[in-house]
Structures are given as structure tokens and as C-alpha cells.
């Protein structure tokens, strides 16, 4: 006897925040490594400031937690039903996340982040996080919808032009 459809959905949907965590942190450290070698201004090489790794790791963890929390509050990580208007929901979560991490980096400077957080890291991280997470989720949603088509239980809705005539046949 195979897995139930609901078990499959829940395990896939519980994995989404974990995968988002891995991608967000991976993108962050990719941008951090990029910042150590360049500032991406064509034909100009400015001095690269000292970046405190401890503060950067703390910032990455705070930012990841904020993304997941905002996602939970805005129902990006629904367990029992599909996400309606995924693009709109994801974009809202991302915009609220940008506001939070910008606030954290600038208003917590001197208190938590004594060496500041690089603006380059913040801006490039925003863009890459949006692009990579959105593309990943679109591919994952497409894969999940294909997997749902292979389940044995099908629902047939019969309609004879009256709202009272819906009948579900299993």
C-alpha cells in the first residue's frame, strides 16, 4: 500500500521552508563572497570595506527567520490547501521581508551591527533571492501538480447548467 495523497502533500509543503532556508543562506553567502572580490561598478574599483563575519552571519539568520515568519503569517506555507495567487503572495512576503531587513540593517546599526552591513550585499541579495526562490517555487509547483495527476483518486464533477446539480463521483 502506497503513501496517502495528504501525507505526500504535507511532507512536500513542510519541506518548502527548509528549502527556502537553504536557498536564502546559500544566496547570501554567494553574494558575500562576490562582495569580497568586487563592487560591480564598471571600470571603477572602490576600496572594499572590512566585513565582520559574525555580524553578517547574525544578519543572515535574522533575515532568514524573518522571511519564514512573514511567509507563515501571509500564508505562503499552507499545509492543507494550495496557495491561491502564488505570485501575489510570494511578492508580498518578499516586499515585507525587504522592509524588515532594510530596517534591521540600518536602524540596528551601532547596536547590533557595529560594522554595518554592506549595501551591496543587501541589494544584490534582495534581487537574487526573489529571482531564485520564485523560479525554484515555480518549478516545484509544476512538479507537484504533475505528481497530483498520477494519484488514483480522481474527482469528476457533473454539471447540467444548474448550481444544484454538482455531484462528486469518486
Image (cartoon, grey):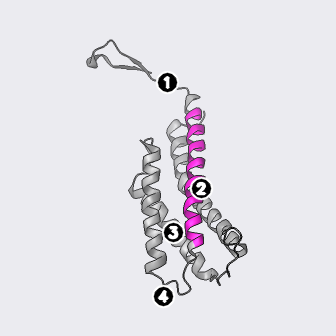
x 47%, y 51%: residue: 90
Residue at label 4?
A: 110
Give 139 or 169, whichever is nearer the viewer.
139
Q: Which of marks 3 and 4 precedes in the sequence?
A: 3
x 56%, y 73%: residue: 119
Residue at label 3?
A: 63
Q: Position of residue 77 (x, y in %)?
A: 46, 51
Q: Secondary structure at mark 3?
A: helix
The quadrant of the picture occupied by the C terminus is top left
Q: Secondary structure at mark 1?
A: loop
Q: Which residues are magenta?
A: 120-147
Q: Secondary structure at mark 4?
A: loop
Q: Which of marks 1 and 2 precedes in the sequence?
A: 2
Q: Position of residue 117 (x, y in %)?
A: 56, 78
Q: Secondary structure at mark 2?
A: helix
Q: Which of marks 2 and 4 precedes in the sequence?
A: 2
Amino acid at each position: 500500500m502506497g503513501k496517502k495523497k495528504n501525507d505526500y502533500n504535507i511532507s512536500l509543503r513542510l519541506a518548502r521552508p527548509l528549502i527556502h532556508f537553504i536557498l536564502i543562506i546559500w544566496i547570501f553567502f554567494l553574494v558575500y563572497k562576490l562582495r569580497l572580490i568586487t563592487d560591480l561598478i564598471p571600470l571603477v574599483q572602490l576600496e572594499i570595506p572590512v566585513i565582520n563575519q559574525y555580524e553578517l552571519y547574525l544578519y543572515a539568520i535574522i533575515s532568514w527567520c524573518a522571511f519564514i515568519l512573514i511567509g507563515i503569517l501571509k500564508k505562503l506555507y499552507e499545509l492543507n490547501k494550495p496557495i491561491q495567487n502564488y505570485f501575489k503572495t510570494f511578492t508580498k512576503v518578499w516586499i515585507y521581508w525587504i522592509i524588515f531587513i532594510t530596517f534591521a540593517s540600518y536602524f540596528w546599526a551601532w547596536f547590533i551591527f557595529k560594522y554595518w552591513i554592506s549595501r551591496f550585499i543587501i541589494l544584490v541579495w534582495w534581487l537574487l533571492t526573489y529571482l531564485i526562490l520564485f523560479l525554484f517555487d515555480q518549478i516545484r509547483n509544476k512538479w507537484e501538480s504533475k505528481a497530483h495527476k498520477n494519484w488514483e483518486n480522481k474527482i469528476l464533477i457533473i454539471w447540467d447548467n444548474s448550481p444544484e446539480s454538482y455531484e462528486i463521483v469518486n
